[in-house]
Image (cartoon, rainbow, N blue to C red):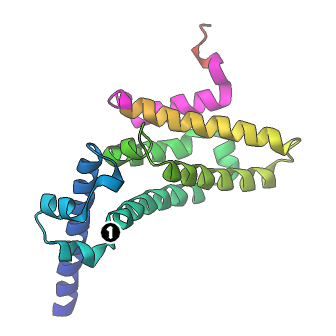
Amino acid sequence: MKEDKKEEIVDRRIRKTRRMLRECLTALLKEKRVQDITVREIADMADINRGTFYLHYKDVFDLMEQIENELLKDLEDMLNHHQAQDLLSRPSLIFAELYPLVQENADIVSILIGENGDLNFVNRLKHIVREKCLNDWKALKSLRNADAFDAYYSFIVSGCIGMVQYWLGTGMKETSEELAFMTEEVILNGIRVLEKD
């Protein structure tokens, strides 16, 4: 029993240290590009020695990559626990989960998909969504034109990333539920949602 307690304390310390390192990297990314950030700067800001940093990450890029991997895994898990048929008819189901994830990680997401963001992250994000949508939708529907699907997919995914950028850039005034509904309306009905009756 004592061993379990010790392990729990160690796990908690590890999580706390990693969270602190992530917060410090995020704060520094608001001021400079990732390639201009040093381990020393992060360690100093976190009030730890560099050796402690290296217990968790190889370098600044490894820390950045692990943050990105965690976010993308969360997205992939969300996508995978929904049936394609449900997402086709009710896209808001996934957005109702996605926007709270964005809100919870707003600091780093705004940097990753922002003006000086990480193009690799955005491309990986698009790839995950594309694979899920393309494979599932092909299984459900016989697509007349795969090229047209690619164009439609590119438009929708870029629009959804734009919606997240808009939301973060305007201080997240809408609730995540309101934004999920708005996104679904735009995907299903296009610009007509803005027309008066």
Q: Verify whether residue 189 appears in magenta.
A: yes
Magenta stretch?
Answer: 169-192
User: In the image, residue 57 lies at what x, y percent?
Assistant: 32, 72
Determine the main secondary structure of the stretch shown in magenta.
helix
Residue 55 horizontal/vertical position (percent): 26, 78
Q: In the depicted view, which residue is nearer to us: 101 or 63?
A: 63
Q: How many marks?
A: 1
Label 1, on which residue? 59
Callout 1 secondary element:
loop
The residue nearer to you, when weighing 179 against 160, is: 160
Tell me if residue 85 comes above or below residue 197 in the rendering. below
Residue at (34, 64) in percent of width and height: 63
Three-letter residue code for mark 1: Asp
**Residue 45 location (% of width, % of height):** 14, 58
Residue that extends furthest to the left in the rendered view of this protein: 47
Could you tell whether 60 is left or right of 49 in the image?
right
Q: From the image, which quarter does the N terminus lie in?
A: bottom left
Q: Is residue 175 magenta?
A: yes
